[in-house]
Image: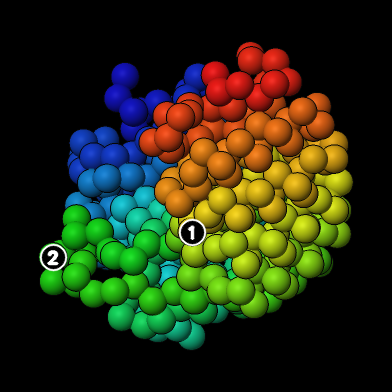
Amino acid sequence: MSIVQQIKENDPELKEIRLAEDPLAYAPTVAELCDALASNTEINHVRIDRDFLPCMNDEDIQPFFEALSKIPSLLDAQIWHASVQVSILAAFIKATKQLEHLQFGCLELEGEENDFSLINEAIQGHPTLKSFTMSDFSLNNESISMDETIAVLGTIPNLQSVKLEVSNRRRASVVGPTRAAQKVQVTLSGAGLAKLLSESKSIQKLHLNRLNLDSTDFGVLAEAIKTAPCLREFALPHCNLDDGGCVKIAEAIGQNKTLEKIDLSCNKLTDEGCVTLASALEGNKSVKFLRLWGNVKISNNGFDSIREMLEQNCVLERVPLMTGGTYGVATIDPLQAGRSGKAA
């Protein structure tokens, strides 16, 4: 039985589909695929990737998303690797009131900055959304300010996870080599992120990657982390975190009572920042995982401070490292090596 037949006949075993090839690989016409999707009541997870949308005619993209939005059982939508009009995505989000997980990746959003506000309107107060991811996205040649989007995320009552990753380059496979050479312009302030943590009562995971943050941003973000009511995971890789910003973040980590997993990898930390973190974690009772790899200026002296901290901290379980010193590529693993903090 072909996949379009399975979709149309509501095969109870077909809960998840990935559409990654030319649409005509799944059905004789896009219209037939749309009709099948619109009538389905069993599919929970859809991932759109690779060649699917790039091979689709422009006039078929809107009917496709309209059909997808009619699946009443759809909980998870992952939309990757395409150039799509912002208005089409916004209409899709608005129509899928049962959606719990939404992921956008490697997208060239078509429209102007004012059009991007349609996404914000669609997700505002969304009744069921639990996770929201935007990774490697751009808006034609316009700059995008994500602060309004972040503020709107704070209105979603059940939102537990937010992941934002910014790329400096577009994908040539999506926009072609000429436009791929143009720099992506996405801005996001620490004040906006702080507001999200302060206003949301449900955020458990905040993952920020490749954001251009500065000392002021880290300061206001740190203040919000101190009192975030249920934040369990906080990731800040590739965000220009230096020793000065680390002082503020470390203080927040020390005061927060719910954090369990922290990722500060691939930043600008030195031994000074590592010592600051070790001091903040010495009496911490919640953090179980700390990732520091990719901070190439941390030497053995800095990692020694982590090892010494583990003599007092009985909660931290793993500290993945990446250094060329005594530890090599290693993990400080107290559970395997004992509380001496010996590199495993």
Residue 142 x, y percent position in the rendering: 36, 82
Q: Residue furthest left?
A: 177
Q: Amino acid at mark 2?
A: Pro
Pick the front one: 307 or 198: 307
The N terminus lies in quadrant: top left
Circle 2/circle 1 CB separation < 8 Å: no
Residue 99 vs 164, above or below: the answer is: above
Query: In the image, is 52 to the left or to the right of 36?
Result: left
The secondary structure type at the circle numbered 1 is loop
- Res 57 visible: no
Please give the residue where the numbered disc 2 appears in the rendered image. 177
Residue beneath the point at 15% across and 64% down: 176
- Res 286 visible: yes
Residue 147 vs 92, above or below: the answer is: below
Spatial separation of the CA atoms under disc 2 and disc 1: 31 Å
Pick the front one: 155 or 128: 155
Query: In the image, is 110 to the left or to the right of 223?
Result: left
Residue beneath the point at 27% across and 45% down: 50
The secondary structure type at the circle numbered 2 is helix
Q: Amino acid at mark 1?
A: Lys
Which dot, 2 or 1, sits closer to the camera?
Answer: 1
Upstream in the sequence, badge 2 or badge 1? 2
Residue 302 x, y percent position in the rendering: 58, 44
Residue 174 x, y percent position in the rendering: 23, 59
Residue beneath the point at 46% across and 78% down: 144
Residue 314 vs 98, above or below: the answer is: above
Please give the residue where the numbered disc 1 appears in the rendered image. 268
